[in-house]
Amino acid sequence: MTEPAPDAARPYVRYIDKTRAYYLSQGYEKPYAWANNASAPFTPLSKPLSASTVTLISTSEIAIKGDPRFDDDPETRAKGNVYDVPSATPAAMLYSRTQSYDRYATTLDDPNAYFPLDRLHEAVARGRLGKIAGNCLGVYNAYSQRKTVERDAPEVLGQCRAMGVDVAILVPV
Amino acid sequence: MGLVCRVVEEAGVPTVCVSTGRDITALVRPPRSYFVNAPMGNNFGAAGDVATQSRILRAVLALAVEARDPGLILDDVLQWPAPFAFNPAPATPEAIAKQLRK
């Protein structure tokens, strides 16, 4: 299934037009052009989940309380567009800096709603998952297909390979 | 994020994209997607709803194992209890200044 679900009883937000207007309001020079792909690559999972290493990758601007990498100070801010969040970080230490969500409908107060680290640890404890990779990853929205494909995605791939990741869960926010 | 999924998957690491934006996901076409019809930031359900977060994570992991069709989008059953849209924070002073400089 690749087309929008035709279930009128459960309409969903059309983000493409809305985010185009939002990016313009944020000072971006040109409307964002979404990728439009007719096919998708595919790699089967090569081992059982119970023996697999999993990581979380998020554009939620997930941050760690007290970590100077997430301060506004340019001297201490993390360099680059991809950064690590140690998977041993307690969820209570995580928060999101993003502003691009419906602030009238929800909050980002519970990281597990968009960065379910506690739920992953529980899945490992139950034996459903092998383990969580040493790091989860944050990726800042690049607002550029080229930068995403040529700069950020290879960095994510390299870090996944270095950590022996078998399957990655990616969560756009 | 769908583009990152495609690059990572193409290089041999399976991915699942957990999306709240179905129109974007259908266009970008990540290898495997799990769509949750919830406000942005609630990809795994509501804040504090541990049962739903666990259920969605189980479904996402199952999709990693069971998907066979590249580009598949699987729809979660969640019905968000109230209307929602896309109402991000207003433009920052920096963004407004950038607009004015154009």
Image (tube, coloured by chain):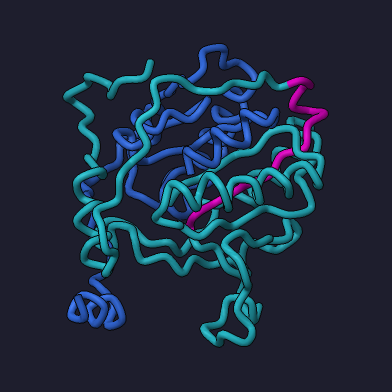
Chain colours: A cyan, B blue
Q: Is residue B33 above or below residue B69?
A: below
The foreground one among A15 and A80 is A80
Provide residue A125's location: percent of width, then percent of height: 78, 41
Provide residue B24's location: percent of width, then percent of height: 33, 37
Q: Is residue A160 above or below residue A142?
A: above
* Residue at 68%, 43% in the rendered image: A157
Mark yes or no: residue A125 visible. Answer: no
Q: Is residue B62 above or below residue A32?
A: above
Image quarter (top left, top right, bottom left or bottom right) of the N terminus of chain A: top left
Q: Is residue B74 left or right of residue A30?
A: right
Q: In this view, does B20 lie to the left or right of A152?
A: left
The image quadrant of residue A2 is: top left
* Residue at 26%, 78% in the rendered image: B98
What is the total number of numbered labels drawn onto the structure image? 0
Q: In this view, does A4 lie above or below B41?
A: above
Q: Is residue A27 left or right of residue A159?
A: left
Q: Does the magenta stretch include residue A115?
A: no
Mark yes or no: residue B53 visible. Answer: yes
Provide residue A53's location: percent of width, then percent of height: 77, 37
Q: What span is in magenta?
A: A46-60
The foreground one among B33 and B8 is B8
The image quadrant of residue B95 is: bottom left
Provide residue B101's location: percent of width, then percent of height: 21, 81
* Residue at 30%, 41% in the rendered image: B80
Q: Does the magenta stretch include residue A54?
A: yes
The foreground one among A93 and A61 is A61
* Residue at 61%, 59% in the rendered image: A82
Q: In this view, does B84 lie to the left or right of A61?
A: left
The foreground one among A132 and A82 is A82
